[in-house]
Image (spheres, rainbow, N blue to C red):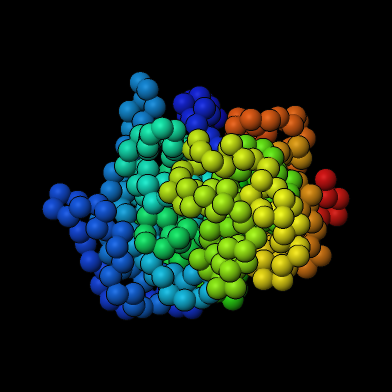
Amino acid sequence: MRSRLLSLAAVLTGTLTVVGSGAVSAAPTWTDPATEAVADFYVPPPIGGAPGNILRAEPSVVALSAPGQPGMVPARATRVMYVSNDAQDAPTAVVGTYLEPAVPWLGPGERPLVAYAGGTKGQGDQCAPSKLMSQVVSYQPPGDLIFEYDLLAISSLLSRGMSVMITDYHGLGTPAVHDYLNRKAQAHSLLDAARAALQLPGSGLGPNAPVILYGYSQGGMASAGAAELLSSYAPDLNVRGAYVGGPVVDDQYFIGHNDGRSNIAPTYAWILNGMAANYPSVRPVLDAELNDTGKAILNESLGKCAVPMGLAQLHAHTSQWTVSGQPLTAVIDQSPALKEAFDEQRLGGLTPEVPVLIASAANDEGAPFPPIHAMAASWCSRGVPVQLDANSQIPSMAGIIGTHVLAFFPALIASQQWMMDRLSDVPAPTNCGALP
């Protein structure tokens, strides 16, 4: 297993970047890619049914294989559009991809489902994981490039015989604006992806199959948010635990911590675009507070993937975006509407009812460690069995291939046995008494 991960890592390292009831109310519509354009799949039909209800589904293809090693993603893939709820709890359509492994599950009990939340892909519709899985790379001139690097972790899970359902999140691929790093919307998308997979005809999963929430970076935030909302939003799911890798815990802290770093700059625009689309009070504030440069950055970033070259990189300091010349964090603090929207994204205020493994590099230059430690301590104070693995061996590094990216690999390996133990009902470890 370790050699398999390292083989995939060699291929993918250069492309990694920072950062109710589920009953089916109607039969899904199955489409044939040979007769229906893929783009049409992402235009939602009338949305009906409970969260997790399947609106349509079609066979899909996972195109990636490593050089000299064909078939490294051994699974049958199905693209699924399902019902979820957005940040305002309104019904919406989200797309995901279900991967049924080609190898048997050799662990205890029935085959488990990993509800997988991917890392940062961008805000353009072409960045949706369900689209990236069907091609090696997405490139739009002059410099908008993205690679489906999450296939590294997904392949390792499939090789263990675990089914995987990866969500595109709300607004990626579909007409809505992707609300990047939105706590509720991401959590809803992930939990409803699990519901949809359990309902998918022919999935081979039982309605009460064990579920693991899993994500790193943006996905770590989604997994953490899903763990916090599980008991109130999706108590029907048999979730055994949540792996929360390198999460962004506090959007405002994240912006302030990274302000001035050109490779992170587009993420601030994605956050603001999502908030403007989700919170009616935010749009007029941004219109008043952002100068022409800031507005142009937000507009350009709407269509960008996670390794773009554009205005945001040329104006990495957010003080260049504002009319006042103040950084975004100061503008947020001075605006009640912005402050309320940003505070709503912060994790740690609710109580997960499942064991949690948090993996984070203490020197992470992308998803900063102090808010992660605070989230872990908050959960511990509520009696949650939390294991916080703070990798201090990776030094602080600048650039795209930095600490945040490199920490992905040891965290991926460490998460495997933790997941197997949760599925085997081994008592969950915790280091709450001596958090690193």
What residue appears at the point 49 percent right and 69 percent down from the top-left corner? 86
The spot of residue 195 in percent (x, y) is: 43, 67
Give the image quarter of residue 386: bottom right
- Left or right? Give the position of 349 relative to 16: right
Q: Residue furthest top?
A: 68
Q: Residue furthest left?
A: 35
Residue 350 seen from this side: no
Between 182 and 144, the one nearer to me in the picture: 144
The spot of residue 323 in percent (x, y) is: 67, 55
Between 265 and 74, the one nearer to me in the picture: 265
The spot of residue 275 in percent (x, y) is: 57, 63
- Left or right? Give the position of 133 relative to 337: left
Quarter in which the C terminus is drawn: top right
- Left or right? Give the position of 255 relative to 45: right
Between 322 and 364, the one nearer to me in the picture: 322
Q: Is residue 233 above or below residue 306?
A: below
What residue appears at the point 34 percent right and 62 percent down from the top-left corner? 81
Residue 63 seen from this side: yes
